[in-house]
Image (cartoon, grey):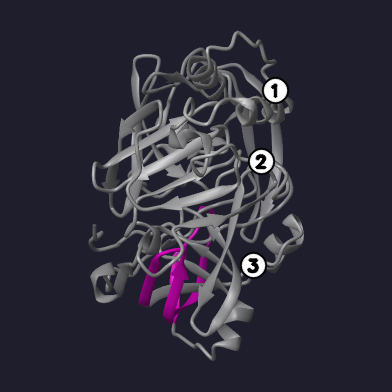
Amino acid sequence: MRIGAACVSPALRCWGEGAMARYIVFTLSCAWVLSCSAVSAQPSSRQNVLPLKLYGQHLVVVRGSIGTLENRNLVIDTGAYPSIIDGAVAKKLHLTGQAEELGAVTSTLRRPAVMVHSFDVGPIHAEDVRSLVQDLSAASQKFGVRIDALIGLDVLAHSSFRIDYGARKMYFGPVEPLPSSAPFRVVDAKLCVDLRAGSRSVRLLVDTGAEKLLLFGSRFPGLAAPTLRTQEFTNVSGNFRLRQIRLDRLQLGDTNLAGEQIYVSDAANLPPYPFDGFLSTAQFRQIAFDFERQEFSWMTNDERRDHFRMASGSSISLPNSSMALPYVNAAIEEAPAPTITSEYCGERGAPGVTCGLR
């Protein structure tokens, strides 16, 4: 699958303190398309399963290559388009580019755009990928890990993939649908899904780089939702405030997300984004992006427990807490091997939960 012209591309994040310390910068240049880069998936010769580490409960980091630099820390960020490399990486690769004007939420910034010779992520080998350069040292300091690049859909969309947050693994290639699914749409190079908030239709960008679910308040005039708290955040363009709200229902397929933390931005000067906010994937046990079927699928922690009970015939009652996950895994390891064959359980076996950080 190839995505066409990216006239408005989500790119840069700001990493500050708190739940939603991130913002989107949009490039004003429409002069390039993804098809100018060579991207291929080579399952026969490259690794189809990557171990991942999880930072801050949501940040997915895998190892890969940027040009001649191997074993780099790459953030899997479906909300990034185009991909972004750290300034230190650009310096090591002797990459220079012309600064482009970027429209942020509250100001205008300028960041250089460069041509990265290649990215290697699992079986994906991408050549001549136009990327933005951003100082990611603040993100590295916040999460306690060096971040070399944010890998977006300009690279990732060339292979279907699945992320298992519990097993701490990322799988590339054909994926089987997880228990819940919804069709996605690629709108101006943004991967979006439709939800229902009461009687309203809501379109959210599916963002593996987002910590919490965020709605743009200007898209919901008269939203009757109680505010639980407000919190101030800081990014490079200044200070801003977000409200945490409570909704009775926010329906994605057969899943009600109203129980998750939902934040609202009341910024009045937002650009005309083709979506109404960001859908964080951190609340799911597993997620999958099937670019052949144009489908996003997921497994909640509750579905994980239900799937185990159906597969094993067990009547074990588990608390609704992440502390229950090691017990789920231990029970699966004791089950007869032929009983549980679904890919939902990890690399066709019982995943551990000891790798990575929370």
Q: Choose top left, top right, bottom left or bottom right for residue 89.
A: bottom right
- Could you tell me which residue is drawn at 30 percent across and 62 percent down? 6
**Given the image, on which type of amino acid does mark 2 rest?**
Gly
Q: Choose top left, top right, bottom left or bottom right for residue 94.
A: bottom right
Q: Residue 47: x, y in percent?
A: 46, 63
- Regarding residue 294, the answer to whether it shows in the image is yes
Question: Which image quadrant: the C terminus?
Answer: top right
Q: Nearer the viewer, residue 212 or 39?
A: 39
The disc label shown at residue 352, or none: 2
Q: Nearer the viewer, residue 187 or 224?
A: 187
Q: CA distance from mark 1 to mark 3?
A: 33 Å
Q: Dot 1: within a 10 Å radius of its alpha carbon, few (fewer than 14), some, or many (20 or more) residues?
A: few
Q: Choose top left, top right, bottom left or bottom right for residue 354.
A: top right
Residue 22 higher or lower than 42, as above or below: above
Q: CA distance from mark 2 to mark 1?
A: 17 Å
Residue 179 higher or lower than 160, as above or below: above
The disc label shown at residue 136, or none: 3
Q: Dot 2: within a 10 Å radius of its alpha carbon, few (fewer than 14), some, or many (20 or more) residues?
A: some
Q: Is residue 273 left or right of residue 23?
A: left
**Of marks 1 and 3, the one in the foreground:** 1
